[in-house]
Each structure stands twice: as C-alpha cells, then as structure tokens.
Image: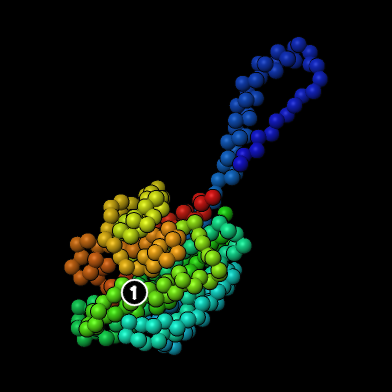
Amino acid sequence: MNKISKTFIIGLLPMALLACGNSNKKANSEAADSNALGAEKEIQVEIPAFDADSAYHYIDKQVSFGPRVPNTKAHQACADYLTSQLEAFGAVVFRQDFDAIAYDGTILKSSNIIGAYNPESKRRIALFAHWDTRPWADNDPNPKNHHNPVLGANDGGSGVGVLLEVARQINIKQPALGIDIILFDAEDYGSPTFYKGVQREDHWCLGSQYWSRVPHVPNYTARFGILLDMVGGKDATFYQEGYSLYFAKKLTKKVWNKAHQLGYNKYFIDQEGGTIVDDHLFVNKITNIKTIDIIPYFPNNEQSSFGDVWHTVNDDMEHISKETLKAVGQTVLAVIYEEK
C-alpha cells in the first residue's frame, strides 16, 4: 500500500502568502503526484533474471550420473546431489523416502525431494518436476534399443534444472509467498509399450500419487501448482494442456499471458493441446491444488507428439536448448514473484 504523507501548516498566514499558496497549488499538486508515482515505482516487484547457463549446468550434472532409474546407484547418487543442492540454496529440505510398487510388482526404492522456502507462511506456491528417468527407450525408432534406459536430459533433467535455478534465485531474493520445490520420483516407470498386461493410468507418476496422499507436512495446501516436464527441448512448443485447462483454466491463461508479455510467444502457443497423464493429474485429483502442466506438444511430429527424442536413447544434452530453458524459467519466475 502506498503511503502518501500530508503536511499540515498551523497558524494564520498573511493574505499575500495565501495568494502565493493558491498560485502554487497546481505545482505542489504535481509535485505530490510525482512523489506518489515515485513511491509506486519503489514498490514494484523486481523479478530476477533467469540464468539459462546455470539451469543447463544443473541438467548436465544430473545426466553425468547416467540414467536415474529407481533401484540403481545412479539414482541414489542423484538423489543425494539434489538434496544437497537444495540445502545449499537455503531451502528447508524434506526427503520423502518410500517404497513404490511398479506395474509388475517390482518394489522401487523411491524418494520425493522437497525444498521449502519460508515454510512458516500459509500462502504458498508449489513448483513440481520429476527427477527419475525411464528404464526403457520403448519409443526409439530402433527396436533393439527398447530395453535400454533413457538418459533423460529433457525428460526428467530439464524440469529439475529449471527449478534448481529458481531455487538459487529464491535464495538470493525471497518472493512474497512461500515456495515449495517438489521433485517427484518414479514418474517414468509406467508400463512399457511391450508390456502384455493391462495399461493403466496409475502405473505412472508413482511419486506424485504418494506425495498427494502423504504430503511432506500435514494438511499441506498451496494457492496453485506448476508442473514442468520436458521444458528444455530445441524448438519446443507448449500448448495449453487439456487437464490443465479443465482443473485450472484461469491459472493456465495467466501463465501463457505472462509468457506472451515477456515475448515468448513462439514457445507458449495460445491453443489447446492434448490431455496428458502426468504428475499434475494426480495432484489435481487427490489434493485439489489447482495445478497446470508446462509440457511440449508437437501436433505434426510423426515420431511422437512429445518430440523426436522422447523415450529414446537420444534424449541427451545435445538436444537441450538454453533458449527454451530461458523462456520457461523466466516465465515461472515472473509468475511467482508477481503473486501477492
């Protein structure tokens, strides 16, 4: 709220001075208006500049561990890295270790990793991504690769990389609301295309299903949530995902409008895309936190509507774009810092 100071002059003034005061009334009023405008400028929110080089580095670091598939050493090493990195960026970190049951009965040693900023605040925003990678490149054009794990630079690494850069910025300058950066595990262990059994939605997103039922703090709620998935691909286009529009239309429009204001029209397409079974679906259904998904959609791509390298052995750093990371990261920063 702007504070406008008022000066009261006490006493009787000579008529000449009163006349002079009347003649200067307009000038004094303009000066007051100018001061008020200056006060408004002083309280405008300063949005940090998203550093795409930094986000790229965090993706590269994850990729250096290899595929982050549950029950592997690379998975454990990356979990420790993400935990320590959020701690280094000043977050109160919750490590939510749990056993997930995969589609085929495999027990997956899993960890949701949460970094909370200003945890005492009841006014919160949740930012989500998944950090695990796919055990099978079952969409690879070469069938011989279908049983090989995916490196996951984009699918897994990119959303986390953006959120780590967001965490670094929050550590420098805290926004008005409390922020929770929530990294889900076991998102990409859904049944492969070569599985002969029944394909089900709840085979996917095991970490978000667990967190939604057992949040890191009791009775957790947030004003809204934003999920980032595969947000680093070259020439990515982000259409407005169907479940996002169904559960959180106003938020979807708000984020896309902000991206357009920032000049990222070529990335954020003002059209509806398809519906995606992703972490946000379970967050919306189970917690009722209005959550959207920023995820690429390529309507004319023959390989996949998620792009050429989705669930292939080619999902590596060569296909990560700093320009795409910047568009998504700067948009997210603007949204969370402008929230009151």
Nearer-the-camera pick, 113 or 137: 113
Q: Is residue 58 left or right of residue 263?
A: right
- SS for dot 1: helix
Residue at image location 56% in from the left, 73% down from the top:
93
Identify the residue at the far top of this view.
15
Residue at image location 62% in from the left, 34% down from the top:
35
Q: How many marks?
A: 1
Residue at image location 20% in from the left, 70% down from the top:
303
Q: Pointer 1: residues within 10 angstroms few (<14), some, or many (20+)?
A: some
Residue at image location 29% in from the left, 80% down from the top:
191
Q: Which color mode does the image show?
A: rainbow
Q: Amino acid at mark 1?
A: Asp
The quarter in which the N terminus is drawn is: top right
Mark 1 lies on residue: 202
Q: Residue 328: x and y, percent?
A: 40, 60
Nearer-the-camera pick, 26 or 192: 192
Question: Does residue 266 appear anywhere in the picture?
Answer: no
Q: Which of the 4 image quarters holds residue 194? A: bottom left
Q: Which of the 4 image quarters holds residue 197? A: bottom left
Identify the residue at the far right of this view.
11
Q: Which of the 4 image quarters holds residue 198? A: bottom left
Q: Residue 99: x and y, percent?
A: 45, 83
Question: Does residue 10 appear anywhere in the picture?
Answer: yes
Q: Residue 118: x and y, percent?
A: 60, 62
Nearer-the-camera pick, 230 or 252: 252
Q: Is residue 303 left or right of residue 220?
A: left
Q: Residue 155: x and y, percent?
A: 35, 72
Identify the residue at the far left of this view.
302
Q: Is residue 127 left or right of residue 296?
A: right
